[in-house]
Image (cartoon, rainbow, N blue to C red):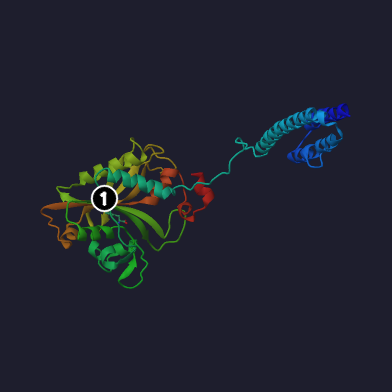
Amino acid sequence: MELNIKEQLEQIRATAKDRLAQIGSSEELENLKVKLLGKKGELTNVLSQMGKLPPDMRPAVGQAANEVRAFIEERIKTAKQQLEERELLRKLENEKLDVTLPGKAHRAGKKHPCSVVLDEVKDAFISMGFTVASGPEVEYDYYNFEALNIPKYHPARDTQDTFYFTDDILLRTQTSSVQIRTMEKIKPPIRVIAPGRVYRIDEVDATHSPIFHQIEGLVVDKGITMSHLKGSLDIIAKKLFGENIKTRIRPDYFPFTEPSAEISISCFKCGGEGCKFCKGEGWIEIGGAGMVNPKVLELLGIDTNEYSGFAFGMGLERLVLRRYNIDDIRMLFENDVRFLESL
Ligand code: PHE
């Protein structure tokens, strides 16, 4: 009888070892634990036969039973740890990140070509001590024409076909209006540029748009001469288009400058020899300029015995088209993303 129970205990120990080795999940392990050690488990079942043993044998069998229980508990603990490790590994395996997968592309915006060139122009002038001024696009006739020595019925008005709201209020046709507003506000020395939108009635085609941008410049100080104008234009042209660029001024007419000039830069494509880009001329016209007409200065209370000034107005779009090698001004206003991204 005693042997029998001990054999049974050994049996339980031996098979427990094999069964534990085959366990695949925590659930299976829990079930096996109940089967082996539970209240109705195999070990309890064997121990229930202890009562049939003679009392002097019971301690030895009891001790053997405790050893088997301790052994099984120990094995279960180890199995549990191994299972948990395996399950953790499996979890990590499933949640693995493939850092070599391509990411989601973000489409970054970028500056419009007009802004790129305008920023460069601004930087160049600011580096020469200019500040940036601005004025309204809806303007009084006075600032756009009258104060610039272009009275009503002056033929110069015909060259700037104007959008009028009333007899007196219009969409500015030139940034020269900001010259007047600036001289109203500040006393010489004055050194400003005024970039902004201007409007003229025009059919849209490859070279015309009813909206475009000008960059006005105004310098008023003691002893300002035409050579200051030429020198400033030289510096700007070189900064924008490179060291080999030359500037040219030729006589022109504007009511608010005297003398007046047309500004051109040497063609940066052919260097001045003439190509299809500059229509064979070697030069590209970029705007108008001149010495501020003393009549204008006097109207604003500036003493012309003491002060003189120069002014210029450049078309921004022309610079941008040249710079990006584009031959149609509409490309700059249509905002076709495919085109803008290609620049
Ligand atoms: N405002 C003139 C134009 O639009 C350009 C200009 C500006 C000429 C300043 C002289 C001085 O044609």
Image quarter in which the N terminus is found: top right
Residue closest to the eye, 238 or 272: 238
Q: Position of residue 228 (x, y in %)?
A: 21, 44
Q: Amino acid at mark 1?
A: Thr
Picture coordinates of residue 296 (x, y %)?
Answer: 19, 60
Q: Secondary structure at mark 1?
A: strand
In the image, residue 81 sits, relative to residue 122, either above or below, namely: above
Say if disc 1 is inside 8 Å of ligand 1.
Answer: no
Asked which quadrant contains residue 44, the reply is: top right
Report whether residue 271 is seen: yes
Give the number of callouts: 1
Q: Quadrant of ligand 1?
A: bottom left
Residue at (56%, 44%) from the top-left corner? 105
Q: Is residue 204 above or below residue 85?
A: below
- Picture coordinates of residue 170, whole percent (x, y): 34, 67
**Residue at image mark 1:** 131
Image position of 234 (left or right of 327): left
Residue 5 versus residue 159: which sits nearer the camera? 5
Q: Quadrant of residue 83?
A: top right
Q: Is residue 158 left or right of residue 202?
A: left
Indicate the position of residue 234 as horizontal and vertical percent values: 28, 41
In this rendered view, identify the residue nearer to me: 243 or 28: 28
Mark 1 Cα shell of 10 Å, populated few (<14), some (14-19), many (≥20)? some
118 vs 225, left or right, is right
